[in-house]
């Protein structure tokens, strides 16, 4: 059974740092792209970072330069280092697995999600 | 970054109604578009992938269409279990992804 378990969330002051972790199990971790997606209260899903199997990383403009995604395949773990956080980063952060479609080349779906870890940034 | 814009942001409909949600991409994404249903307390679930292919196990009342920059998700006959928030997601720039802002469907 695929499981993704996040940890590391909490309360942090604006300008501070936080490191989120995601422990993965039930699948061959090093063969999948992984992502962090967040959801602020009453808002929609927002993709905040992705990492490929080769360690290549991707970010939207809203977090580029402040967040760093990394993976440790030997530990089946995904991380998100959040620096210089802002009040607007307050959200529940989900670890998620990306899978490529067997039908369409390079079409990526998000097929498994963790339960999320809450991050609150105070001013 | 590719931006995804959904409309409407919310809607209220009755059981049996036909419901259509639209999603527009800021750039041509061909058919690299997926739709998800998100119910409170549950993880998002894939409904449609590749703009128009029905995910296994998803009822046939759900359908998707479109290509390029304009896409639609249609529920042909709304059922009580269809409440929740629907999101489009582009993967043209995968692994960099983008979700639409969501459409909340109330029964």
Image: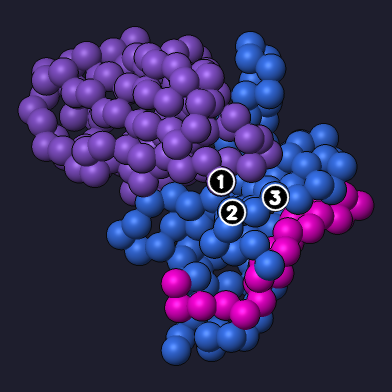
Distance, label 2 to label 3, CA atoms, is 7 Å
Q: Colour of chain B?
A: purple
Single out the residue that lies furthest toward the right: A74
Query: Residues at badges 3 and 1 in contact (C-beta under 8 Å)?
Result: no
Chain name for mark 3: A
Distance, label 2 to label 1, CA atoms, is 7 Å
Q: Residues within 10 Å of mark 1 (few under 14, many from 20)?
A: few
The mark lying in front, picked from 3 and 1, is: 1
Q: Colour of chain A?
A: blue
Q: Which mark is residue B1?
A: 1
Q: Where residue A36 sits: x, y (%)?
A: 61, 53
Q: What segment is highlighted magenta in the picture?
A: A66-88
Looking at the image, is A60 positioned above or below residue B17? below
Q: Secondary structure at mark 3?
A: strand
Q: Residue at x 82, y 40 (%)?
A: A53
Q: Quadrant of residue B79?
A: top left
Work out whether residue A77 can be spotted. Answer: no
Tag 2 and tag 1 share a subunit: no
Chain name for mark 1: B
């Amino acid at each position: 059974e695929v499981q993704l378990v996040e940890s590391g969330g909490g309360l942090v002051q604006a300008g501070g740092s936080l490191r989120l972790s995601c422990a993965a199990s039930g699948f061959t971790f090093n063969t999948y792209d992984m992502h962090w997606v967040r959801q602020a209260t009453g808002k929609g899903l927002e993709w905040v970072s992705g990492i490929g199997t080769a360690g290549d990383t991707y970010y939207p403009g809203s977090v580029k330069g402040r967040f760093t995604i990394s993976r440790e395949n030997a530990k089946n773990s995904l991380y998100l280092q959040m620096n210089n956080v802002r009040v607007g980063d307050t959200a529940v952060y989900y670890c998620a697995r990306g899978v490529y479609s067997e039908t369409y080349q390079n079409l990526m779906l998000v097929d498994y999600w963790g339960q999320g870890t809450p991050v609150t940034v105070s001013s | 970054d590719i931006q995804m814009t959904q409309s409407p942001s919310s809607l209220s409909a009755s059981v049996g109604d036909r419901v259509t949600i639209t999603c527009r991409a800021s750039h041509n994404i061909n058919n690299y578009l997926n739709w998800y249903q998100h119910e409170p307390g549950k993880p998002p679930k894939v409904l449609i992938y590749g703009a128009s292919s029905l995910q296994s196990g998803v009822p046939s009342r759900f359908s998707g269409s479109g290509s390029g920059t304009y896409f639609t998700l249609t529920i042909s006959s709304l059922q009580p279990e269809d409440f929740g928030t629907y999101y489009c997601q582009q993967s043209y720039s995968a692994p960099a992804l983008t979700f639409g802002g969501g459409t909340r469907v109330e029964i």
